[in-house]
Image: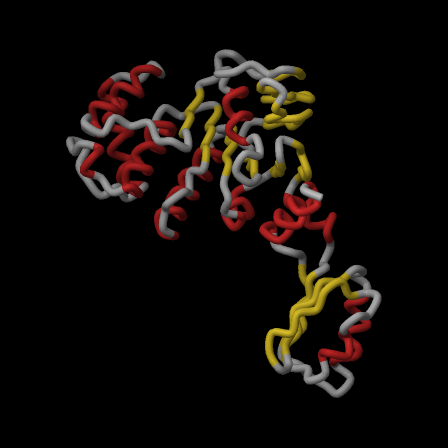
Amino acid sequence: MIEFKNVSKNYDGFQAVSNLSFQLHKGEILSLIGQNGAGKSTTFHMLLDFIKPSNGQIHRNNNLNIGYMPEERGLYLKESIKSQMIYFASLHGMKRVEALEKLKIWMEKLNVVGDIEDKVESLSKGNAQKVQLIACLMFNPDLLILDEPFSGLDPVNADLLIKAVLEAKKSGTMIIFSTHNMENVEKLSDYVVMLSHGKTVLKGTLKDIYNQFGRSKLDIVGYNNLQRFKGMNGIKDLAITSENSAQLTLNDVSFGKYIFDEVTKDGYIPVFNQHYPTLDEIFKEKVKESEK
């Protein structure tokens, strides 16, 4: 297990991280989200013991086998894939034969376009990124830290990366990653910590977070008198998207039943969908609140 207990980090009066607390257990994925400068990389660097916290405690096993993929990728452009992977694997006690076998397996899994003898500089950005991930995965790490792993990847390669991360999770690896892509957070996370200017503005399981906001979003299509709902007490916002469709944000989720009864008085409408806000919408709302 890894635990942060009221961890803070100050740089000459600048509060990079403030009273951060979370736990991460074997086979769990935690996503750390926030805008640029929110404190994500500082958190990773404290976890890796690159820097010390100003206050609080970090508990982790010092013998953890850690795979770290930094936001600024760290491959040697003039070296071959093979030579680098053998070197990185040796740092974790792997034999050359085993490393080569694992490298070939992972290159096939991630559909890396290239040969193990190719130099990194000859690879596309996406393929180089996948090779960087292989360097983190091939020795079966206890802890995998991924800083913006999806940056610059097309949807196909992003899905390959997601499958690789989920495979690592299944094997028991603890995983913590940062990203600006909320869709990938929803696909991967057991637990979410949202930071804004170093402060924790939201944390919990995805289910906990969605339940906190409730089914406050409502999509209606096929009703011709949507303006009548504008300004009602149970409605926070109403955006009419076309003549007979709108997106509503409710102050009171129970008000959805009243709206449903009203719009269906004359019978069928094609769309009435009361749902949770997306994680992206929640993120934007919490950041806006934190900046007031």
Where does residue 218 sit, x and y in percent of width and height?
Answer: 69, 66
Which quadrant holds the N terminus? top right
Q: Is residue 286 left or right of residue 100?
A: right
Outermost residue, left side: 117
Where does residue 141 sit, x and y in percent of width and height?
Answer: 43, 24
Give the residue drawn at x 49%, y 34%.
Answer: 169
Res. 208 in view: no
The vertical placement of 24 against 163, above or below, is above
Res. 276 in view: yes
Where does residue 190 sit, x and y in percent of width and height?
Answer: 59, 39
Give the residue drawn at x 59%, y 18%.
Answer: 12
Outermost residue, top side: 62
Give the residue drawn at x 27%, y 23%.
Answer: 99
Count of picture labels: 0
Q: Is residue 163 left or right of residue 3?
A: left
Report which quarter residue 164 is drawn in. top left
Outermost residue, right side: 233
Which quadrant holds the C terminus? top right
Report which quarter residue 87 is drawn in. top left
Q: Is residue 9 left or right of residue 170?
A: right
The vertical placement of 52 against 209, above or below, is above
